[in-house]
Each structure stands twice: as structure tokens, then as C-alpha cells.
Image (tube, rainbow, N blue to C red):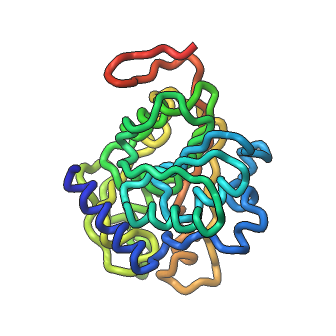
Amino acid sequence: MSRVQQQNRQAWDDRARRGAWYTETATERHFKNPLAVIDQCGWLGGDVTGQRVLCLAAGGGKQSALYAAAGAMVTVVDISPEMLRLDRQVAIERRLRIQTVEASMDDLSALEPASFEIVVQPVSTCYVPDVEAVYRQVARVTTPGGLYISQHKQPVSLQADVVPSSRGYGLNEPYHRSGPLPPVAAGTPHRESETLEFLHRWENLLGGLCRSGFVIEDVAEPRHANPKAEPGTFGHRSCFVPPYIKIKARRKHDTPTESLGRRIWTP
């Protein structure tokens, strides 16, 4: 395990233990209509019953549980054993069948090729240096014609100040950069202070997805702006700096995939 993987694994283990942001499990309210919660864009066609779904880098007892409650056959992959513990906890409480796999999102060798019709990935690619390595792994495990829904931190959000000056939220980080971003103060709502995060340019986020064998079908920018919020808060900053982008992509039928060191052509 690399230094980046070790630190991010430890960081999310710690966050899960203390119930930090983004480690909250699904609640009774969510289970009343799980599909409406997980498919706010309407990209899943109204039904996931019997679909093989991979919740990638999505531990924490929310995504996996809601997909399973909606009728999907769910596998959740996460690098953090504590986050996966939450998935198993909710599965037991709700009597849901969920398979958990401890692995990094850029190494899915534990999973069989073309084994999922749907792959869903909440915001998490910022924790790996190479987003295209993740895309290639997703392409390998997604069936031809399968769906990949991913959400990412927008590059500008990782460049911009978290606290405004008299001129607003300035851009302090270069767009073309290598290595992890500088640390931020604990409690910053736009980033996770204990983790190592990386800025991925649009040519990698979008172009890399296409080069990895996907066709982009739709894009959404989840709205978090609140004009009435106090300066420096997540809602106020989101009025000027878009925090996330959500991408719907389809696995092409004629793209080669890699499996166990040999190239396979999908029909």
C-alpha cells in the first residue's frame, strides 16, 4: 500500500469512528423511498431491481444500503475497513445482502471483468493521484453498455480559497500541478483536512473517461449555493465556486478491457 493509500485509509477510518461528515449511515427517512434518494437526476431508469451494482469508494452504510433496499445486488468497495464496517452494520440491521470488499479504487483486481451493470461512485477520485487509473479499472469491471455514474470535486474548488478576502474567493493553487494539495484547517467544509487530495484537470476528468472506453451521456452540477449564507460557509462559497460535478457515462461495446494481464475484446 502506497503512502497516499495508507494516509487516506487511516483518515477515513478515523472519520468513521468519530462520525465525521460523509460517514453518516442511511436513516429511516432515506429508506422510505431509497431510489429517489440515490437517483435524484433520474439516470437509473426508475428501477434497479436485480441489477448488479458496484458502489465504488462508497463505504459508510448509505449508498450500498439504499441500492440494496431498492432491489439491487450490491457490492461496495472501499479502502477503509471502518467505513465498510458501517455498511455491514446497516446490512445486518436492515436484513440486506451486501458484499464488502476492502480495496483501493484504482486496483479492482479482486473483482471479475464485466461483472456490474451499474457502477456508482460518490466524490472520492480526489484521493488518488491518477483519476484515469480509476476509470480503466471501472471499464474493466463494467459490462458493455453498462452505466457509470461518478461525482467529483471540480478543479476550481480545489484551487480556490476556503475563506473569502475583500475581493472574494481567490485562486491560490495552480491548475497544472503535481503532488497532493497543501493541507487545510480541520473543519473546512470543502475538503477533508486529514486526507491527501489531488487536483484533476478537466482533460483527465472528462477526456480520461472517454479514453477509458466510456461515452458521456449527461452532466449535472449539484446545487449547493445559498445566497443568504454567511461568507466562508459552504453555501456562500458555492454561490461563486462550484463544488462538484456529476457525470453519467455509458461503457462502449467495442472497447478492449484488461484482465489478469491479457487483453480481451468485448463483442
The one of 42 and 10 positioned closer to us in this rendering: 10
Residue displayed at 40% across by 23% down: 258
Is residue 158 left or right of 35 when viewed as pictured? left
Q: Is residue 31 above or below residue 185?
A: above
Extreme residue toward the left, this view? 3
Is residue 167 left or right of 72 when viewed as pictured? left
Is residue 131 left or right of 39 when viewed as pictured? left
Q: Is residue 258 above or below residue 71?
A: above
For residue 132, say whether it is visible. Answer: no
Q: Is residue 3 above or below residue 117?
A: below
Residue 115 drawn at (x, y percent): 54, 32
Is residue 104 left or right of 111 when viewed as pictured? left
Residue displayed at 74% across by 56% down: 35
Image quadrant where residue 180 sits: bottom left
Marker count (numbered): 0
The one of 184 and 136 positioned closer to us in this rendering: 136
Residue 2 drawn at (x, y percent): 21, 50
Residue 267 drawn at (x, y percent): 58, 13
Q: Is residue 118 above or below residue 245?
A: above
Residue 244 drawn at (x, y percent): 53, 58
Image quadrant where residue 204 sits: top left
Residue displayed at 30% across by 48% down: 129
For residue 172, say whether it is visible. Answer: yes
Residue displayed at 72% across by 66% down: 31
